[in-house]
Amino acid sequence: MGVTPLVWIITIAITIAFFVFEFFAHVRKPHEPSIGESARWSAFYIGLALLFGVGIGIFSGWTFGGEYFAGYLTEKALSIDNLFVFLIIMTGFAVPKKYQQKVLMIGIVIALIMRGAFIAVGAALIENFSWIFYIFGALLLFLAYRQAFSHGESDPANGKFMRFVRRVLPVSEEYNDDKLTVRKDGKRFVTPMLLVIIAIGFIDLVFAVDSIPAIYGLTNEAYIVFVANAFALMGLRQLYFLIGGLLERLVYLAQGLAVILAFIGVKLVFHALHVNELPFINGGEPLLWVPEIPIWFSLLFIAATVAVATIASLRKTRNDDEKKKRETFDGEKVIHAPEG
């Protein structure tokens, strides 16, 4: 793709500028965003991401454009899964609505930094060790299995990691506006706000393990990996408030993401076999008969999977709501039925 250091510097500078703008324009003064505000900014960031992808297609070729769109769509779907966990954390810590923006903003910045580090490491590994595709593929297949059969029973706010943090740090019981620490009786305590940020930072680290191998299964270009992740995270804060109620209705999101991760895992294994250098596989020679899955098929498969998971989830929750209403109505009829 031939991305120069200057383009990297400009891209990173603009990304930082967007997040600085977000902080001063929306987050600095605590408030709960309206649906209209969240919708406008979500549409702006999604539109900007799509426009950027068109720009890549026009100036660098539609092969790279397709890789960007497939990567962006995958990262956006995984980011929505992030939002669901963020919602669980916010609920577990009982974060007041007007302070949730600050927590999300800090969490998203941490996520971008974590992913940036993983992107750099992944690019170096891919550049020097082609066998890393076997490891990435196996990791994604394992993560797909875990994603498909996890039941969301764990509570990040009360997990082992957070229990350890509470043992190490003196924690106050109540929030003190949006402050991270508070002094009581001459002793410094951390507030629940800091614990929330620590929990989200830890979750971001876990999600980066899913995210980066997944997108490297769609493109080898570190620049595309970075911008797809950056755009997927931009507007995530507004999306949280826009679809907060909808998140609980996406009951098949985990299964849809599992299918996507498994597909990319298989794609990575196929690619690893196609460029094989391991001496104990085919004598160290590439298996050229193994098919390479084209990016257009990956893009269609990922988009279709997201669409099917969303439609099936909304249909199921709607049917469940109607069934619950009928049962409630029938129960009331039985209770009020005349005797005799």
Image (cartoon, rainbow, N blue to C red):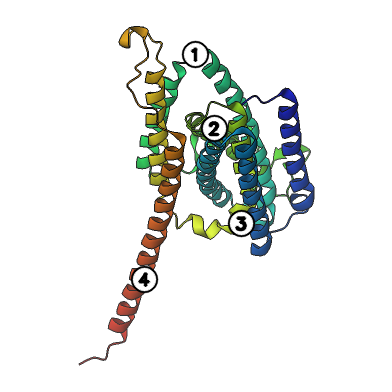
Residue at figure coordinates x 69%, y 52% from the top left: 99
Q: Separation of disc 4 and disc 3 at Cα?
A: 26 Å
Q: Are marks 2 and 1 in contact (CB under 8 Å)?
A: no
The answer to whether any part of residue 196 appears in the image is no
Q: Separation of disc 2 and disc 1 at Cα?
A: 21 Å
The residue singled out by tag 1 in the image is 129
Report x, y in % for residue 338: 26, 91
Q: Nearer the viewer, residue 315 or 291?
A: 291
Q: Quadrant of the C terminus?
A: bottom left
Specify few, some or many for label 3: CA neighbours under 10 Å numbering under 14, 14-19, or 20 or more: many
Residue kind at label 3, given as amino acid type: Phe
The answer to whether any part of residue 288 appears in the image is yes
Specify few, some or many for label 4: CA neighbours under 10 Å numbering under 14, 14-19, or 20 or more: few
Residue at figure coordinates x 49%, y 38% from the top left: 159
Look at the numbered disc 2 and give the secondary structure of its residue: helix
**Label 1 vs label 4, nearer the camera:** 1
The residue singled out by tag 2 in the image is 208
Residue kind at label 2, given as amino acid type: Ala
Residue at figure coordinates x 72%, y 42% from the top left: 180
The residue singled out by tag 4 in the image is 322
Q: Separation of disc 1 and disc 4 at Cα?
A: 54 Å
Residue kind at label 1, given as amino acid type: Phe
Residue 241 image label: 3
Where residue 334 sits, quadrant-wise, is bottom left
Q: Nearer the viewer, residue 206 or 289?
A: 289
Q: Earlier in the sequence, mark 2 or mark 1?
A: 1
